[in-house]
Image (cartoon, rainbow, N blue to C red):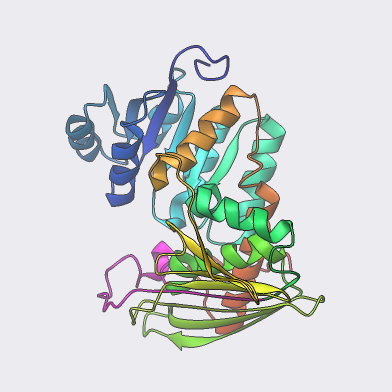
Amino acid sequence: MAGKNGSGAVRWGILATGGIAASFTADLLGMPDAQVMAVGSRRPEPAKRFAERFGIPRAYGGWEELAADDDLDVIYVATPHSAHRAAAGLCLEAGRAVLCEKPFTLNVRQARELVDLARARGRFLMEAMWTYCDPVVRRMTELVRDGAIGEVRAVHADFGLPGPFPADHRLSDPALGGGALLDLGVYPVSFAQLLLGEPDEVRAVGQLSPEGVDVNTGLALGWDSGAVALLSCSITADTPMTAAVTGTAGRIEFPRGFFQPERFVLHRPGRDPQEITAVDGLRSYQREAAEVMRALRAGETESPLVPLDGTLAVMRTLDTARERLGVRYPGEAGYEGEG
C-alpha cells in the first residue's frame, strides 16, 4: 500500500457519481498526498463521465470491478444510504479500506455487519462524519473534557432544510432511506453523543410523509447522569442549524452551520464571552480524508476521531428514534435493533 508505508500518495477509488461524490473528489484532488485512481458506478456511462470530469484514469461500470482493483488503497462510498451496506461490504470483502458516507447504514444491524467484517478482515473502516474531524469541534471537546464549562447538563442542536422535496427525491423515498432523521438528524445526534456518549433514554416525536418517512422530527435524549439533549431535524423548514452545550460552569454556542463550524463562543460567569477558532487550512471533506490517510499510514484499522463503536452507538439511537416514529424501510420487516 503506497500510503501505508509513507511512500507516495494514498490511492483512492470513488464508488458512486452523485453530488456528494463529486464534492468529495474535488476536495481530494486538492490534496498533494492523495491520488484519485478510479471511479465506479452501476453503469459504465456515468463512471466515464465522472472520470472525464475529474481526470480520473479508470472508470468501472460496476462496483465489483472497482472493489477488485488492487492498485487502490481505500474506497470512498457515496451511494444513497440504502446501498451503503452492500457497497461498503463488497469493498471490505475485496480487501479495500473504506470511508463510508453518513449515515453509516440504514440500521444498526447493517452497521454491526460492516464493523464485524472490517474487524475480522483487519481492514480500515470509518464513517464519513466530517464534524468529528473539524478542528473547531475538536477544540470544543478538549475544553469540555478539561472542565471549561463544568459538567455538561444539556445539548441543543438542530438541522433543517426548507424543502419541499418531491416524492421521487431521495429524501422522500423510503427505498433510498429517506427522511430527515437519517440524512440530517445524524448530525445533531452525533454531536450530542460526542459529548455525552450513548443516551440511556430516547424519545422521539414527528410528522411522517405520505410516503412514510419522517419530515419534521424532535428528539429528547436522556442520560442517567441527569444530562439531556434536545435535538430536531426537518426537511420542511429552514432551521437555525445552531448548537449549544450548557454546563454547570458555562456554555458554548455554535452559530449557523454547527456541523462544519468556523468558530464558537465560550460563555463563563464573570468573564467576557470568548470567541474561539481553530484553523488547519483544510476543507470539510479534506479533513475526513486526511484522517483516513493518517490512519492508513499508521497501520490503524479504526480512527480514534471517528471510532466504530461510536458509530454503532449513534445508529442504535437512530434506530430507537425511528421505532418511536414508526418509520421502517423496505426490507426491514421483522427487524429488531440492538436495543
Q: Which residue of the protein is positioned furthest toward the right in this rendering?
A: 224
Q: Where is residue 217 in the image (x, y as percent from the top left)?
A: 49, 82
260, 301: nearer the viewer: 260
Q: Does the magenta stretch include residue 161?
A: yes
Q: Residue at x 71, y 34 (%)?
A: 120
Q: Is residue 84 above or below residue 282?
A: below
Left or right, residue 183 beside residue 226: left
Q: Do we see residue 109 in this rendering?
A: no
Bounds of the magenta segment: 154-179
122, 314: nearer the viewer: 314
Q: Quadrant of the C terminus?
A: bottom right
Q: Residue at x 29, y 33 (%)?
A: 61
Report the magenta stretch's main SS.
loop
Q: Residue at x 65, y 48 (%)?
A: 113
Q: How many marks?
A: 0
Left or right, residue 55 beside residue 77: left
Q: Where is residue 324 in the image (x, y as percent from the top left)?
A: 61, 82
Q: Is residue 272 above or below residue 85?
A: below
Quarter of the rendering containing residue 82: bottom left
Quarter of the rendering containing residue 65: top left
Q: Position of residue 93 (x, y in %)?
A: 57, 32
Left or right, residue 150 beside residue 334: right
Q: Which residue is drawn at 28% across and 77% down?
A: 163
Q: Which residue of the protein is positioned furthest toward the top in this rendering?
A: 7
51, 157: nearer the viewer: 157
Q: Position of residue 336 (x, y in %)?
A: 68, 69
Q: Do we see residue 33 in this rendering?
A: yes
Q: Is residue 291 magenta?
A: no
Q: In this view, does 333 lie above or below 64?
A: below
Left or right, residue 194 beside residue 63: right
